[in-house]
Image: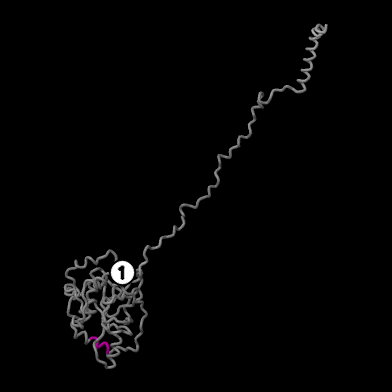
């Protein structure tokens, strides 16, 4: 009986169950999950809104390549000593004529004198250089010391020998021979040159005091280089670079310059020329007479000594 009652009431029970399920469905709203019903076109997050074409950072605005740092202007790899390579001097000096020499026209002293002719200039080919300089003049001085034998002739060769004879013998008998060859050689190499014959001021004082003894003098060479006249002691290698005044007769070099004498005052110019014959000396006797005449006339107390910078070439 129970089974029948259950069977008869089953349709009603099913109906009740469906009503209950419908009520629960409204409460729980069986809405499909978001995964099943995509959100409206899946409004994507602003896909990392790209920065305007990756405006690059101001890549450290570089320094203009056209204005580089001074790249440490390289220093000379060798700073030569003044005696080796002195700095060339500007051609701005104005010279006055003196001792019969027109210093304002140095080209006039490129021509050799009768005594200073060089018959075979090829013997000097090893001395030729592309540029003129004080350093090159030092090379000529060293050549003189290396290729010639110096000896004391006691003045016997003054005004007697020629440059050709001295080059052939390779012997120099004193400062006159040194100066004669040096002046002729540098002229052949393109430098205007003048010989300057001087007397020792100390000797002049002794002569005026009535003392006897050997005559003491010295020969220098004036050379025009880099727009200036410079003074060179072709016997000992001393030289005065840019502050030399060829019109001043006083050469205030001291020490052991002429022979064994120890100069305490310096030298006074007696005469100048392209060679010994050029300034009127043709024999040792004429040389002695010329020194005596100058010594008798010189007022040694009135001498004004110039301030020169003397340098020296290494041998």
Quick check: is 221 in the magenta stretch? no
- Residue 264 appears at what percent x and percent y? 33, 85
Which residues are drawn in magenta? 290-295
The answer to whether residue 5 is above or below residue 308 is: above
Q: Residue at x 19, y 67 (%)?
A: 123
Secondary structure under badge 1? Answer: helix
- Residue 70 appears at what percent x and percent y? 45, 58
What quarter of the picture does the C terminus occupy?
A: bottom left
Q: Residue at x 80, y 10 (%)?
A: 12
- Residue 19 appears at what percent x and percent y? 79, 16
Quick check: is 293 in the magenta stretch? yes
- Residue 116 appears at what percent x and percent y? 20, 74
Q: Give left or right: position of 111 versus 21.
A: left
The image quarter in which residue 170 lies: bottom left
Residue 167 seen by the camera: yes
Label 1 neighbour load within 10 Å: few <14, some 14-19, many 20+:
some
Nearer-the-camera pick, 251 or 27? 27
Nearer-the-camera pick, 23 or 9? 9
The answer to whether residue 20 is above or below residue 212 is: above
The image quarter in which residue 260 lies: bottom left
Nearer-the-camera pick, 31 or 281? 31
Q: Which residue is mark 1?
A: 135
Q: How is the image coloured?
A: one colour
What quarter of the picture does the N terminus occupy?
A: top right
The answer to whether residue 52 is above or below residue 197 is: above
Residue 278 seen by the camera: no
Q: Residue at x 18, y 71 (%)?
A: 118
């Amino acid at each position: 009986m129970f089974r029948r009652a259950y069977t008869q009431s089953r349709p009603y029970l099913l109906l009740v169950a469906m009503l209950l399920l419908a009520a629960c469905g409204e409460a729980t709203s069986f809405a499909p999950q978001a995964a099943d019903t995509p959100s409206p076109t899946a409004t994507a997050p602003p896909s990392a809104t790209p920065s305007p074409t990756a405006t690059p950072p101001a890549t450290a605005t570089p320094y203009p390549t056209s204005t580089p740092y001074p790249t440490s202007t390289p220093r000379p790899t060798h700073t030569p000593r003044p005696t080796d390579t002195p700095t060339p001097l500007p051609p701005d000096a104005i010279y006055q004529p003196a001792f019969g020499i027109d210093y304002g026209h140095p080209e006039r002293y490129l021509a050799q004198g009768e005594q200073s002719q060089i018959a075979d200039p090829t013997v000097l080919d090893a001395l030729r250089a592309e540029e003129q300089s004080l350093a090159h003049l030092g090379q000529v001085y060293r050549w003189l010391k290396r290729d010639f034998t110096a000896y004391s002739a006691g003045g016997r060769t003054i005004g007697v020998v020629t440059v050709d004879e001295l080059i052939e013998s390779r012997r120099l008998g004193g400062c006159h021979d040194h100066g004669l060859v040096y002046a002729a050689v540098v002229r052949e190499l393109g430098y205007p040159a003048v010989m300057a014959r001087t007397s020792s001021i100390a000797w002049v004082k002794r002569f005026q005091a009535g003392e006897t003894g050997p005559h003491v003098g010295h020969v220098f060479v004036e050379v025009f280089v880099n727009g200036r006249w410079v003074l060179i002691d072709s016997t000992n290698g001393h030289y005065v670079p840019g502050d030399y005044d060829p019109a001043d007769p006083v050469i205030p070099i001291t020490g052991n310059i002429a022979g064994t004498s120890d100069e305490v005052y310096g030298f006074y110019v007696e005469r100048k020329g392209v060679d010994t014959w050029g300034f009127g000396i043709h024999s040792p006797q004429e040389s002695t007479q010329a020194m005596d005449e100058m010594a008798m006339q010189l007022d040694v107390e009135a001498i004004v000594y110039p301030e020169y910078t003397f340098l020296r070439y290494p041998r």
